[in-house]
Image (cartoon, rainbow, N blue to C red):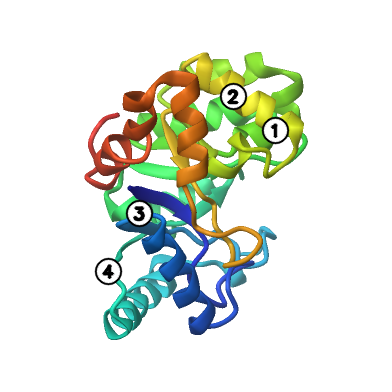
Amino acid sequence: MLDLHTHILPGLDDGPRSWAEALEMARLAAADGIRGLAATPHLYRHRRVYQGEMNTPDRIGPMVQRLREELSAAGIDLQIFPGCEAPLCPELLDLLQAGQVLTLNDRKRHIFLEMPDTVIPPATEDLVFRLNAVGIVPILTHPERNAAFQEMPGKLGRLLRLDCLAQITAASLTGGFGRRAARFAQKLVQQGYVRLVASDAHDARHRPPQLSPGIEKLARLVGESKAWDMVTVVPKKILQGMPV
């Protein structure tokens, strides 16, 4: 399996605080059957839109390389790919074009886009359209946990009819983020809105990098083949910069 949404790089955001904890997360991922994961820290280190605290490619790249070295030294068989999770903000396109935002695996094709927790800004569709115009496909992270999408699922449908994808969190399917998120995640999957499942891991205890329980639930909803595609075929295409 491939897990494309993790916060495993220590000290960059609200993920692990040390390399030891990052390695513990990596061991859990490998034990779960994950063979590769993308390290996707928040673009803004403290989740505040403040450019002085940005996780730019120059900051993320060396951390990814060090994690690879730490994994090799520890004998953990896990591939690491670079990326980030960017918030919906007016300056995102300018930052991308200036090379300040890392796309998934640096392929200049897909980017994780995090919406505000409780609202859908009026400019959302316009930003997605402008990203598409320069060849970028946004992947909306964990829409099942977004209160606004839960209240107005049609808004999510409109976005996905553009060149935009949805990634849900594996733990949402099994109730890890509450009943409402679980019901909405299952509904989105059954309606065919979801193309990618990831862990959104932040630590080794409360939000670990595990996909298997969610995939078991997913297989009961859409069948084993479609479920496995969301953690194998689709993420592989994204890492290669290919259309999904």
Q: Residue placed at 64% from the left, 18% from the top?
A: 155
Q: Earlier in the sequence, mark 2 or mark 3?
A: 3
Q: Residue placed at 62% from the left, 39% from the top?
A: 172
Q: Between marks 1 and 3, how big is the CA–CA gap? A: 25 Å
Q: Between marks 2 and 3, how big is the CA–CA gap? A: 23 Å
Q: Mark 2 — residue?
A: 186
Residue type for callout 2: Gln
Q: Mark 3 — residue?
A: 33
Q: Residue placed at 37% from the left, 34% from the top?
A: 230
- Looking at the rendered structure, the secondary structure element under dot 3 is loop
- Graded by Cα atoms within 10 Å as few (under 14), some (14 to 19) or many (20 or more), the crowding at tag 1 reads many
Q: Between marks 4 and 1, how big is the CA–CA gap? A: 33 Å
Name the mark nearer the viewer: 1 or 3: 3
Image location of residue 239, percent across then percent down: 27, 47
Residue type for callout 4: Asp
Q: Mark 1 — residue?
A: 181
Residue 197 in sight from this viewpoint: yes
Q: Mark 4 — residue?
A: 77
